Amino acid sequence: MDHLLHGGDYNPDQWLNYPEILTRDIKMMKEANINTVSLGIFAWSALEPTEGNYQFDWLDEAFDRIEAIHGNVILATPSGAKPAWLAKKYPEVLRTNEYDQKLHYGERHNHCFTSPRYREAVQRLDKKLAERYGQRKSLILWHISNELGGECHCDLCQSAFRQWLRTRYQTLDALNNAWYTSFWSHHFDAWDEIHSPSPLGDTTLSGLNADWRRFVTAQTIDFFEGEKTAIRAASPTVPITTNFMADGPDLMPFHGLDYAEFAKHVDIVSWDCYPQWADPAVSDAQLGAKIGMINDYFRGLKQQNFLIMESTPSLVNWHPVNRAKRPGQHFLSSMQLLAHGSDSVLYFQIRQSRGAAEKFHGAVIAQDGSNNNRVFTEVSAVGDALTKLTGLIGVNRPRAKVALLYDQQNQWNLDDTQAYSQQSKQYWQTLQKHYTYFWQHDIPVDILPPDADLSTYLLVIDLMHYSLPIEQKTKLEAYVQDGGTLIGSYLSGLTDETDLAYLGDSPLAKLYGIQRNEIDTLYPQQQNSLRFETRTYPVHDYAEVVRPTTAESIASFEQDFYAGHPALTVNKFGEGHAYYLAGRSTSDFLEAFYPPLLNKLKISGSQVISPLLTVSVQTRDSSEGPVSFIMNFSAAPVDIDLLQAGVDLLTGHQLTAGKQQLAGYGVIILQCVF
Amino acid sequence: MDHLLHGGDYNPDQWLNYPEILTRDIKMMKEANINTVSLGIFAWSALEPTEGNYQFDWLDEAFDRIEAIHGNVILATPSGAKPAWLAKKYPEVLRTNEYDQKLHYGERHNHCFTSPRYREAVQRLDKKLAERYGQRKSLILWHISNELGGECHCDLCQSAFRQWLRTRYQTLDALNNAWYTSFWSHHFDAWDEIHSPSPLGDTTLSGLNADWRRFVTAQTIDFFEGEKTAIRAASPTVPITTNFMADGPDLMPFHGLDYAEFAKHVDIVSWDCYPQWADPAVSDAQLGAKIGMINDYFRGLKQQNFLIMESTPSLVNWHPVNRAKRPGQHFLSSMQLLAHGSDSVLYFQIRQSRGAAEKFHGAVIAQDGSNNNRVFTEVSAVGDALTKLTGLIGVNRPRAKVALLYDQQNQWNLDDTQAYSQQSKQYWQTLQKHYTYFWQHDIPVDILPPDADLSTYLLVIDLMHYSLPIEQKTKLEAYVQDGGTLIGSYLSGLTDETDLAYLGDSPLAKLYGIQRNEIDTLYPQQQNSLRFETRTYPVHDYAEVVRPTTAESIASFEQDFYAGHPALTVNKFGEGHAYYLAGRSTSDFLEAFYPPLLNKLKISGSQVISPLLTVSVQTRDSSEGPVSFIMNFSAAPVDIDLLQAGVDLLTGHQLTAGKQQLAGYGVIILQCVF
Amino acid sequence: MDHLLHGGDYNPDQWLNYPEILTRDIKMMKEANINTVSLGIFAWSALEPTEGNYQFDWLDEAFDRIEAIHGNVILATPSGAKPAWLAKKYPEVLRTNEYDQKLHYGERHNHCFTSPRYREAVQRLDKKLAERYGQRKSLILWHISNELGGECHCDLCQSAFRQWLRTRYQTLDALNNAWYTSFWSHHFDAWDEIHSPSPLGDTTLSGLNADWRRFVTAQTIDFFEGEKTAIRAASPTVPITTNFMADGPDLMPFHGLDYAEFAKHVDIVSWDCYPQWADPAVSDAQLGAKIGMINDYFRGLKQQNFLIMESTPSLVNWHPVNRAKRPGQHFLSSMQLLAHGSDSVLYFQIRQSRGAAEKFHGAVIAQDGSNNNRVFTEVSAVGDALTKLTGLIGVNRPRAKVALLYDQQNQWNLDDTQAYSQQSKQYWQTLQKHYTYFWQHDIPVDILPPDADLSTYLLVIDLMHYSLPIEQKTKLEAYVQDGGTLIGSYLSGLTDETDLAYLGDSPLAKLYGIQRNEIDTLYPQQQNSLRFETRTYPVHDYAEVVRPTTAESIASFEQDFYAGHPALTVNKFGEGHAYYLAGRSTSDFLEAFYPPLLNKLKISGSQVISPLLTVSVQTRDSSEGPVSFIMNFSAAPVDIDLLQAGVDLLTGHQLTAGKQQLAGYGVIILQCVF
């Protein structure tokens, strides 16, 4: 890549009857400083309108047009939505839901991921695509399928699941032990007695649930690998990705798959970023921290830069309320993506559809075809900015000193377990509260999968690790033993990977130097408090009654029958220290807790400006040295105190240290001068 | 008809084992001034207890008894609920739901509307009824089935739907274009690949949804026409109706059918009116406006008087809280029905059932059989009043000068589209806000279907016309061209009848003289404001950023990035004027906006009293000249200022112009003296 | 029994791979003063791992171990959860839900209660258990299945239901009349046209619903009787029970079965008591009254002492928020169970499971295996207390002078009927409000099923008896005729047992000496008021407009059109008096209403202490005379005024009359000295 990518999804196949639009679109792309176009997403019907009848002319032409403006192509395989003829001829390709209902043809992402027929039909077309386009000079990336997700419960999938279980457990005895089937008389004495979780059967056999989710990830990857192999034969060197997703207004990693596993199979991580800008319930700065975190999560999957494969230039059509980004928000949010390690700003979509489900999703070119509106203008400005940042290309964002662990399988098991309070578990949101502290203080954080190498980090935060496989406990111990500093919390170390409770002491008891006697789950309207140094902080949702063995108590609860018991402990373990937060407190507490600890560890913020809560500073390396993104997450201008001189890459202006005004939603990208 | 009808549903077939009750009921009907009885609704089991075994004795006797008191009969066909033997012998008559589940026998309105078996069985019985009763002198109306509604997804219906689509589109190419199936690879290359919308298949293919709803209306009418034909052979002159419905506390037209189409097939419109009286969340006057509007809607379908086929004398049993009308409310509400053009006050039901689902629905004669209670007394008083209003018979309410357009298919498509904010679309409720202005100022309004002739109206209001077929645009242009005044609004002219977005400028751009750049969807807790004349009014939910081309801005937004942009424009178009409301404001704004406009158009209120917000005046013609209903929609007495002298038809009193007290819930029906 | 039972469910079959745990558990049971262990619940897989392959060694050993510490065994039959092999081999044993979906193997309580295969398999194993263990000296009770409930809609069950209907009605005519099938053309002319209630068929045919619920109870009992017979052959004398349940935070009797019928088939009533302690929305005293009432309900079923078969020593895992009992609450709540007539405090569970659905349900021995924690200590203290109360054994709590009638079938029909306001019906909660008055004033109350003998009671309260079979009306009349005092209320005597409305006057009109004209259902935000003696009390939800015939009005409504009409009447009927509450008022009103009435009837409180609202006194007989439980339902200590001297059985201390402090959650068990 020799450009930061700007562009996105484009479906000429929807406009074959409108040749003047196809011509005009290319001109408008140039005008909007677009250099990259994603083709072929959901194009199966256009590519193979009837079985074996391949139609590539329109796609050839699209390549030609894009190459004529020196654009890049990202080419998708069409497996995200099947044509009607395929479903009619081979019903096995249709998904079966958890109620045993075979789905009709319809919507998208509705195929059986096990079906040999489906895989064969997809891969046949993939091969054709690779053979025809694999060598086009404009082709920079393969985009397999689209937002893979969902599950199928058909007989083929049941067999595949059982086979996967046999491989995992070898014997039924091992499976019965892992799932604790002696409860409720659930002993399995034949593999074919096992069925995927279903409201018609088992929903609360937690080991089954845990393994089913793992199987869904494995089978999805297996499907993906099938496509990859089909492409690789004719296109061995072009990198391959598939676009990942985040869920809900908190921007959690998509719940349906374990991306930590999936990321091992893609050449570059890419994802679709749809924060709910302009929602009055969330301040711009709160949203900024959420966006920062999920981007850091995707960067952390491979500890490499990544791509934003989709975002909206304006609004989406599927939120409960679909409000457009306000002026300035699109530019700010695009720059933030780069700041956290993206090498692209790509959109769904370049040209808005005329009909069907997503016709009112924002696009660079709306149905009115106009270039005379706010959205088009702001998109062009982003494209223009990207051309000024080419120094960033090919240089990964450097590793942080602080790592925050996120374990998708822990999320599954904790969400699934019947205990505590369903509404207040909030694993991701709790990590988010800690992340926000670092975001506000401009301290870089890596979000890491559980098997990541921790050795380079000064501080590791591992909260609410309810389901903790023994090898992870061993790893954490080794990290602290060797001098690391670890922060853990309540609700950790309770079960293993199939949600089987540990007997006796928690596996983390030695590391944290405490024994847990009770977990107090508070009602939402209740609170306790803790005393730390000279102040009192509220405690809500969870408080554990722990007894230090080797740990020292450095804060205690103030109320209820465990008043005076430790709320925060620290344990010297080998060469390092392990802190344990026994209760859930507020951001105020983190503001008191972190500074002395970070000070001791010599971890500090960016040193580019004096930190401000609503201004985020993120630093990337470039071929010319460090580049700092200074971003104002509020509509009001703010005065910043620049600590270093440099050049603002966006304007080319020389900036001297000292007071500076940053416009509402304004961004400075500072190439420091040393 | 030589009486205003008073009476309602009556099921002697439920009381065949209670001969003394049948005798007593007739006496009580007389006592309650009842002159009309609807027989045969849900009586199939009684008429044909086993296949081909017809039992008419009980119905003969019912006719005899009613004729003995000189009553009218409305005779229903029994297709609203099938007998158990039919369902058992011919399972095809059972409905299939959208999950492909064949329903069991049960409840009512559960037949397949396509099934030839069902149609044949129904029509065979209809013919027998027509032959036996078609010439009875007491028979004034046929009542086909009951509250037709619902849909079936069985294979017979799938075939019928595909056939309907073939007729509509001729070619699959045309259908694929209309539904924009190039999105998500949905191209259909065979008719049998198409399936009705289903949670198991497609729910978001908007063109499919739009056409399915049209088909449901068409197929329901087709079913109805089958019954009509069966009756007409032996009963060629007696008029035919079927009872329509309204939905929910806002009294919206039933969502499942397009009554504008259906009304073309009935001789007289009739409907079932169940407002939620006595709900403390809605004031009596607010409710009065809602009731007024839905009655005007039903009158507008054929621009003729109509019948209230069902209402309750007291309470229903299926609201969340079932509170009885308070004293006076039943009389007031009955008179209001007449005021808006009903020629009847009919009840469900005359005699309360003993068992099953609706046994506690209000009735003229309750289970206790008593005539010594409030309900019976109030019903009798309504009956008595009707005898004093015979001058109204056969004289249609005159046309209004103001027309408010309501397009059911627009409602469907707008509700269905994934965009804006689902909760705040509120098409009907927005019309209701405008209607309420006119109701409060005693200005008559016609609610018209989209294909109505507009030429006689001084003012046409056409709001939120999201899905606007081109022929309607043409019609609106012609109306304004010829000198009409039109009011349109935000969210208009976005898609055609299959929800396919218009490309380029909106089809309404010329008419309103504006171009739309953006639609701003506000969160419920947000607001903007607009400046009109000397005041500021809040704006919520929707605001459009528009650019006048030929229009003049007469109000502007005050906040956000489009502050200063037009919030209200007027465009001279041909001989007329087109106003465009670019944002959603409050009733206060309408109070400022309408008076000067109406003044210019010389549209004024009733001139019967000085207008009062909670007193509604509606005027009907009679054989003796105009009759004005002056109705107090509040529990408290009010002083009214009578502007004309006349006779109160209810009391026979001469009223002179000047101050007058109107009792709480009081009604004066003034025959003006000139 | 020579001990009050302390212990609970224990599953050695879950720990066969952990011999050291089995050994340690027995020691810990002794330490916790446990004397009773429930074995075999959900143990089918362990007892018969493959068809016909019985494995009793582990159970033999469990008996041996328990007998070695002189413990009692309660032995369960395993029918609560079937093994996987059974479901695979005989699919008919699987339940079919109301949507006709055959369930998969999974969860528990999922068998078809009609299936001959299932009954045969269960009973074969039951016989083996009875033959092997029926004579063990430690065996004190058979525990059939577990928490029986749920229903099946398969073809076998449809046949059984139809057969049950034939037996009940003899003819279809009788059934058609009872169900009023003339409504909506529902006449049945063949038995096989009838199907259980289903969302796919009928849900609102109230007679069908009523009879289906009765059938479910009858078929569940029939299933239970099958197991009983299987056991009785080899174990003729050991008593038999099955554990009953309560629903929701209000602790209502389980809605799915009529325990009044079921109780006739068990030797001793036992139930599982799971109040939501520590929920801040309910005060400890409010909860205390709820717990008191449901225990009195279970005692009333046979008018005998009963067993608590399950309770939690700490918390459950299936509430929305799972908070542990605070210190002292477990002891208090355990003593309260005894006070109301339980002869046991048993837990689910002695040893916490490692995996699956309920692994975090509280237990005596948690996963950590520790005896050094609050729960274990508090459990041991309860066990210790029980050893001091052996005088209670074998002596039933004496009858009360006040009876409160609860009719499960009335609950079903009233909940089911479409009328009034669904949310405010609240039959059980209304009884609870009256019960609470007596609980607060330390006046014992028996909760009785409708067919109980009333002759010994001075006061009978029978509220909201909507569905009142004629024989119950006759019984109530006889009770009052003979001098009894009866309190009835609004919403009584409207329908019979199949929800068929009474015609003419209510069957209760003579007894209460009133005629009902209207039922006014108020919206939640509305209220009326009533005047009683010198004060005004609010009226909400329901107010009836009644006309006294022979009754005297002693309170009247103050507002609305029925202001001045009676709100409370009393009727002299024979030798007795019948009071009628025509509206729903508050607890304040009961505080005014009850004292003079109770005074007249010479019904007074316990006379053990001066009554306090949060201190409950309940008295049981013992072999040494009356024993009074004085229980503080609040966290704060209170001063009580002891009116009698005695010995506190818990401490052995002599207490003299006069002031005494009772600790927060404190309990005194006073053996009075006369």
Image (spheres, coloured by chain):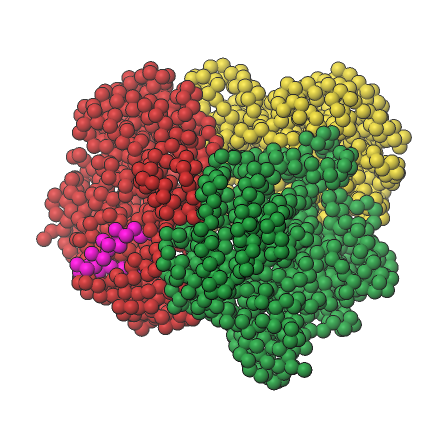
Chain colours: A yellow, B green, C red
Residue at (22% x, 36% y) in the render? C267
Q: Is residue C143 visible?
A: no
Write down the quadrant of residue C83 in the picture: top left
B371 is higher (above) or lower (below) than C74: below
The x and y percentages for residue B658 are 62, 85
> Which is more toward the observer, C294 or C503?
C503
Residue placed most toward the observer, B265 or C281? B265
Residue C481 within the magenta-colored segment of the rendering: yes
Whether residue C191 is visible, yes or no, is: yes
Q: Nearer the viewer, residue A243 or A606?
A: A243
Q: Position of residue B626 (x, y in %)?
A: 66, 74
Q: Residue at x 45, y 36 (%)?
A: C98
Where is residue A591 shown, x and y percent of the image?
Answer: 58, 45
Residue at the outermost left position = C674
Residue A94, position as x, y percentages in the image: 62, 27
| In the foreground, A2 or C257 | C257
Residue A254 drawn above or below residue A610: above
The quadrant holding residue A262 is: top right
- Quarter holding the N terminus of chain C? top left
Q: Is residue A641 left or right of residue C417?
A: right
Does the magenta portion include B441? Answer: no
- The extreme right residue here reads A68
In percent of the image, x 68 and y 58: which residue is there?
B302
Specify start and end residues of the magenta stretch as a single range: C467-492
- Quadrant of residue C581 in the image? bottom left
Q: Relative to residue C548, is residue B642 drawn left or right?
A: right
